[in-house]
Amino acid sequence: MNKKSYFFSLLVASMLGGIVAIKLNQYLQPTQQTESIQERQNIQLASFLKDSTVKVPKGLNFIVAANAVKSSVVHIKTTYGGRGKYSSSSDPLEDMFRQFHGNDSYRRRRRSRQSSGSGVIITDNGYIATNYHVIENAGQIDVILNDKRSYEAKLIGKDPTTDLALLKIDEKNLPFVKYGNSDKSKIGEWVLAVGNPFDLTSTVTAGIISAKGRNINILSGQYAIESFIQTDAAVNPGNSGGALVNLQGDLIGINTAIATRTGSYSGYSFAIPVNIVKKVLDDLMQYGQTQRALLGISIQNVDADFARDKDLSVVSGVYIATLTNSGAAKNAGLKIGDVITKIDDQKVTNMADLQSLIATRRPGDKVKVTYARGKQILNTVATLRNRQGNFDITKSPKKEENERILGAVFERLTVSEKEKYGVENGVKVREVGNGKLKESGIRKGFVITYFGEEAVDSPADIERLIKKRKRVIAIEGVYKNGEKAYYAIGW
């Protein structure tokens, strides 16, 4: 073999070895976990679409968007309280329960209440966005897909301050709605609302964006955020939690409210912008609660009359009325009387604009603040803080609180377990440690059907009722062998 042939063979062998090494490394290396819902969407879309792009037909046409979205909007049915009537029994403790509540009222509280709404599948593996008010205090949450498949959903997290909740069903390869960018949506743009009004599944209505940054004062609480997209697409009871999409089929909002004096659609509806939605839902998925970033100010809207009274040089923006000591704004050099006009070069005309822009950030994030002070327009950088005044990311303490107070770990019953235990609702005691339940005599495997006066069907129910506890709580339930049992715990 001459030198040229030898070197050529060596080169080919080296190249083949490199290719084998790369492929082997890819095979052995674990799949990278995505950090956000949008990252997972992007990865799965690459597989689903195979480099194809959505093209809107010429002229006004809603067919592409409707077909792209309707299979990804689900019907949510929620159940509250127990189901069925109380059966007769000779147990004296049960008789005491019935006498205490009154025979008729005790029977009534065993009956269930049901309501329904909508939700939006946002990942292929079963994460679903909806409104907090759709699932608030629900004992059981059922999700019905467009193809009629039904699942019991797990509540991952909820945020009443934005009226959002995140659910999860155990399924794969689901169609989902891709996130859009609500900041880029324009007044006058055509949009579709997709949901289940009056239990009419997969209903699509069309309208335009009538306004942005609307505050209609429907959410309560100090930290409530309202910066709604207003549309004239027809939305009715049952649409809550459904999708608002543009003509490309991209999600730009979650429908949440209507302006009405009759209870039905009267011309305008309101949706939570998707830029707030995706931040809140990522927080709920990763931490179990929203990571709220704050500037540390109380604010007022600026208009012509207010500007004249305060002798301001601008007639729109947000006026700083008070500052929190050691808050982000004060540390950035802002003062009472300053008027914030931009955040990261995005215009701020009112409080809803400011709340919307800050709501997409987390504690520790830096934002550029443009503000008017007298005749000057100035800039500064503020590092946002959490409610405690620091930069920490916090995780939901719910499970820890249950374990600390009751000394137990709880889990939902599956459908088959409900049949096995002969109950229609209940929460299983998975582990019993030192705490109130052990002291009362409750053993591992016990299914709690009533905690106090309310039927329970999820660990979240018990968490909620712990906060409402009275001096003595009566607990009713059943063991696997069918033995009914009644306990009382004191505080």
Image (cartoon, rainbow, N blue to C red):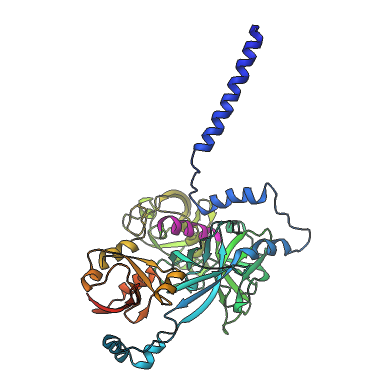
What is the x, y in percent for residue 431? Answer: 30, 63
Note whether 89 is above or below 239 in the view shown: below
Q: Is residue 66 magenta?
A: no
Quarter of the image for the N terminus: give it: top right
Quarter of the image for the C terminus: give it: bottom left
Q: Closest to the observer: 302 or 354?
A: 354
What is the x, y in percent for residue 189? Answer: 67, 63
Q: Tell me the chief SS of the magenta region.
A: helix
Q: Closest to the observer: 420 or 333?
A: 420
Query: In this rendering, would 208 be left or right of 151?
Result: right
Q: Is residue 277 magenta?
A: yes
Q: Closest to the observer: 91 or 474?
A: 91
Residue stretch in magenta = 274-287
Residue 470 in view in this figure = no
Query: In this rendering, would 175 be left or right of 440?
Result: right
Please tell me in which quadrant of the rendered image residue 478 appears. bottom left
